[in-house]
Image (spheres, rainbow, N blue to C red):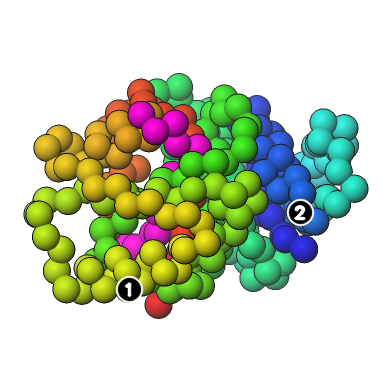
Amino acid sequence: MKTILVPTDFSKNAYSALYCATQLFAEEPCKFVILHSFEDQVTNLTSRIDIGKTEAVVEGLYTASDAKCDALIERINLDAPNDAHYYTATVTSLSLASAINKLIVKEQAHFVVMGSKGSTGANDILVGSNAMMMVQKIQKAPLLIIPADFVCRPILNIAFATGFKRAYLKSELRPLVYLASLSNATIKVLHVHKKEKMTEDQRANFHDLFNILRDSQPESNWLPNDSDHYDAITSFIKKEQTDLLAMIYYKHNAIVRLFREATVQKISKYSKIPFLILPARD
């Protein structure tokens, strides 16, 4: 059984992410752990009230959030009935990042699925501040970010962007291979190259990668570096009707630059597909 952790702020996008998760894992027995953090509300409210009233405020937030979670579970059971799926909810005053990392360990979560924008997300930014923070702070489970207004569909084509600069481990690629297996998807390996030839290490990593992905019909796609690195990737995504973009998260690597606001605005013009962030395994 897979355990899927789904943070929510009860926004439309958060519900869409939950619904898409139920469809993605429709044929799999799953436990969905719905998580809501009201840390921001505590901070905002307690800064304006007497310190002695803080405990009562927090208790009220727990009660209200528990009721919203119960209503959310009732709604998803009606919208996506599945005898192989069941739901639990956790409400916390911890920060969202801390709560997610604790629950990943406690629940042995296989994936974290969240919406790209919350209730206050601006329309011109693809990835909201919470999602960006999760990319940087989640280290023990793959993170699947669902864009706003994404229409759920089978994942048939996956783009995996990489530079072959590091050795690959089966353990860090296992979630990618698993997602591809759900709908027999093809994994299209993308590499934006600046030189005609790879180094010996890159060639070795290239062959190791394709050996790990061999059951997922991997394809090699070399993208010329004639234009902006990310324009090349997003143009490929649009042209090839890609259903999901995947990357391994290395600190200070391309994925950090990918999610900078200016670049994200470019990407949003071309593509509104999920992003799968795979944690690197040292």
Secondary structure under the numbered disc 2 in the rendered image: loop
| Residue shown at the point (38%, 29%) measured from the top left | 238
| Residue shown at the point (49%, 48%) measured from the top left | 186
243 vs 199: above or below: above
Q: Position of residue 34 (x, y in %)?
A: 73, 49
- In the picture, the disc for residue 167 is 1
* Image-quadrant location for residue 33: bottom right
In the image, taking residue 268 as reference, residue 68 lies left or right, namely right
Look at mark 2 in the image and give the residue it sits on.
28
Counting residues from the start of the chain, the first of labels 1 and 2 encountered is 2
In the rendered structure, are the residues bearing label 1 and label 2 in contact, judged by CB atoms less than 8 Å apart? no
Nearer the observer, 277 or 104: 277
Nearer the observer, 75 or 129: 75
Q: Quadrant of the C terminus?
A: bottom left
Q: Which residues are magenta?
A: 239-252
Amino acid type shown at disc 1? Ala
* Image-quadrant location for residue 233: top left
* Residue 244 belongs to the span the image colors magenta: yes
Q: Is residue 84 visible?
A: yes
